[in-house]
Image (spheres, coloured by chain):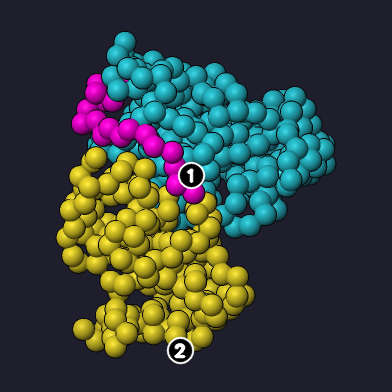
Amino acid sequence: MPRITVTVDGVGYEEEVEPRLLLVHLLRERLGKTGTPVGCDTSNCGACTVMLDGKTVKSCSVLAVQADGCDIVTIEGLGSPGSMHPMQRAFHEEHALQCGYCTPGMVMAAIDLLRDTPDPSEEAIREGLEGNLCRCTGYCNIVRAVRRGAQEMGQAVKSS
Amino acid sequence: MIPATFDYVRPGSLDEACQALASDEDAKALAGGQSLLPLLRLRLAYPSTLVDLGRLPELTGVHDRGDHVFIGAMTTHDEVMRSSLVNSACPLVALTTATVADPAVRHRGTFGGSLAHADPAADLPAVVLALDGVLVARSAEGEREIPAAEFFVDYLESALRPGEILLGARIPKLGDGWGYHYEKFHRTAQAWPIVGVAAAVRRSNGSIQEARIGLTNMGPTPLRARAVESALQGAELGDQVRQACEQAAEGTSPSGDLHAQPDYRRHLARVLTHRAIRTAAGSP
């Protein structure tokens, strides 16, 4: 079996993996990173979105062996219950979730969007999140949360 | 679902990759995996071995070659749509790539993977066909050039032979005076197009001098709308263009599925071709 090394949320792992093992299953079942859910399993919904070398990917559409040598950040690597990432806090404060299943992927996609567009318009947010589906909220509060998160992250950059 | 078992190799050179693909007729090349992995998960494909092309830097990048741009097969959609060279020299490729799927899929999915997969519902094959691109493949026997018009053979079937790897595609630069647009109709933002139309138009003095049109999902392969292209030569913007676009479904053989029946796809081809031509010609 191939042996891979990956860094997940800042911790290095060396794992033997079957070639067919999907990255999302490595994260959840081998490394216990259950903050990343499996949604549709057909690369539509974006619930399983994580950062792979700094860019979003749908972890149900990446083989674990393809991630060999890569740096992965999941929702669990962003913040902690006592110290949330500004985007997580904005989702909480703007009530940008109901069941919460899409939220980890939404937050990752939102942070990815801000890499290029630190102060996105409503339209840019809707475009940037087009690969992430939410069946509860109707998206309005998610858009508000991303704008608020962007402002707070912008403030954080300015004051640091 | 979990894919069926397969072996995995990650070649360190193109020669090794060609050898791995040639030595096993059920082996399949893995590019970004954004089409292939869903097929494996749905158990619609059962390759014996995946040959991962992901660590071959010679397959990535965009290169200016004078009269054309060469786009390496493993260049991701995200890299293609951000390339200043592609945006300036082949804008139709850049603006269409920006509409492929969604940002996360564009981070993994590749230009060459999309072409080699030969899905008639994919956006880029119609663009490369409309621009008369030339695909370059390599095997143990050497390199081979395949015009786009001969590359797309049938549904999910390209002209690539066993043991051949797509190196990339040459996209001719069309020069000044051309306008471009890709118009697609899809159910949801990141869904496959029900029908798509790629248009490049050269315009002068209020009339169209030349047009190139590629159709997405109007048959088992991408197609050129040749009848419209002929009818548009010298057509004045307005009624003449509208009448020319009425021929957009000629020679097509769209399939029916739960999203659209063939007659509806033919209707969409006419409407979307008109929209694509008007926008490409800068005529709202």
Q: Which residue is mark 2?
A: A93
Farthest residue to the top: give it.
B141
Q: Position of residue A22 (x, y in %)?
A: 37, 50
Which quarter of the figure has residue B258? top right
Asked if residue A68 shows in the view, the reply is yes
In this rendered view, identify the residue nearer to me: B150 or A70: A70
Q: Nearer the viewer, residue B59 or B206?
A: B59
Q: Which chain is cyan?
A: B
B284 up-or-down from B230: above or below: below
Which residue range is magenta in the image?
A: B1-18
Q: What colour do you see for chain A? A: yellow
Q: Amino acid at mark 1?
A: Arg
The residue carrying mark 1 is: B41
Name the side, left or right, on which A26 lies relative to B36. left
> Is residue A123 in the magenta section?
no
Is residue B87 in view? no
Q: In the rendered structure, are the residues bearing label 2 and label 1 in contact, judged by CB atoms less than 8 Å apart?
A: no
